[in-house]
Amino acid sequence: MDWMQIGAVMLGLMMLYPAWRGYQAWKQSGKRAEEGDWSAASFAVGGVILFVLLLVLSVQ
Amino acid sequence: MDRRSTTQASIAGLSTLETNKVLRSTFQLLSATLIFSAMTATISMFMNTGFGTYLTCLAASFLLGIFVLPRTANSGAGIGVIFLITGLLGFGLGPILSTYLQVLSNGSQVVATALGGTGAIFLGLSFYARTSKRDFTFLGGFVFIGMMVVLLAMIANIFMQIPLLSLGLSAGIIMLMSAMILMQISSIVRGGETNYIMATYSLYLSIFNIFISLLHILGVASDD
C-alpha cells in the first residue's frame, strides 16, 4: 500500500463526516416526501441516466 | 383588496425578489468559479503536474470547504475562499485531464463530451427544479445516505481494485449529484438557502463530481 492509497483512504474517511452531519441536519428539520415527489425526482434522475447512456453510445 | 392582503402580497413579492436575487448571484458566481477552474486546470496541464497534485488539492479544498468557508460565507472574504477552493479543484483536475488526453486515442472527444454532457445535465436539472412545482428538498436523506454508502464502497475499492465496482460507483455518483442539484436549486427557489456563496459551493461540487464520474464512464466506454 503506497502513500497515495493511504491519502485516498484518509480523504474518503474525512468526507464521511460532512455527509453524516448533513444527514443528521436533514433528519432533524428536513422535509419528508409527499405524494408524487418521488416520481417527479425519479423522472429527472432517469432522464439523466438515459442521457449518460446516449453519451456513452456517442463515444464508442 | 384590503390592507392585510396588500401587505401579504408585498411580503410575498419581496420574498420572490430576494429568492431571484440569491439564484441570480449563485449562477453568476458559479459561472465565474467554473471559468476560473478551467484556467487553473489549463495551467496545471501546462505544468505537467502529477497525480499526487490531484489528491493534495482535493484534500486542501475539502478542509477549506469544511472549516474556513462556513465561517467566511457571510462576508466578502467568502468570495476569495470560494475562488481558492474552486481554483485548487481545477488545478487538481489538470493531471487527470492530461492522462485522458494522452492515453486515449480519442481523448479530446471524451473530455469535450464529458464537459458538454455535464453542462447539459446541470442546465436541464436546474430548469426542471425551477419550473417544477415540487419541493425536492425531501431528497436530503437519500443524498446523504447515498453519499456515505458510495464513500464506504470507494474506500473498500481502494483495496479490492474491482473495475466494475468503480464504474458502478461513478454511475451512482452521477445519480446522487443529480439529486443534489435538484435539492439545492429547490432550496434556493423556496428560500431555504439564502447564502449564495454556500449555494455556489454545493452546486460546484455537484458539477465537479458529475464531470469526473462522466469522464471515467466515457473513458472506459471509448477505450479501444
Image (cartoon, rainbow, N blue to C red):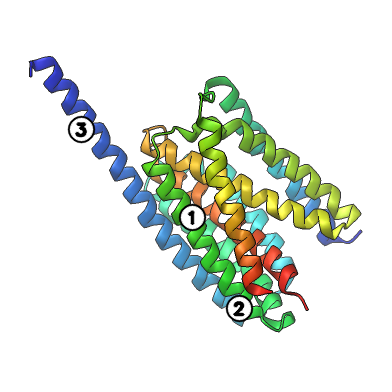
Which chain letter goes with mark 3?
B
The percent position of residue B55, horizontal first and vertical second, equals 71, 60
Q: Earlier in the sequence, mark 2 or mark 1?
A: 2
In this view of the protein, can residue A16 be seen by the observer?
A: yes
Write down the residue under mark 3: B13
Say if B187 sits above or below B207 in the image.
above
Quadrant placement of the C terminus of chain B: bottom right
Say if A32 sits above or below A18 in the image.
above
Is residue B44 rendered to the left or right of residue B23?
Answer: right
Write down the residue under mark 2: B109
| Residue shown at the point (20%, 32%) measured from the top left | B13
- How many residues crowd mark 1 within 10 Å: few (<14), some (14–19), many (20+)? many
Instruction: Determine the CA span between mark 3 and mark 2.
Output: 46 Å
Viewer-nearest of discs 1 and 3: 1
Is residue B151 rendered to the left or right of residue A50?
Answer: right
Write down the residue under mark 1: B122
Q: Earlier in the sequence, mark 3 or mark 2?
A: 3
| Residue shown at the point (78%, 49%) measured from the top left | B154
User: Which SS class for mark 3?
Assistant: helix
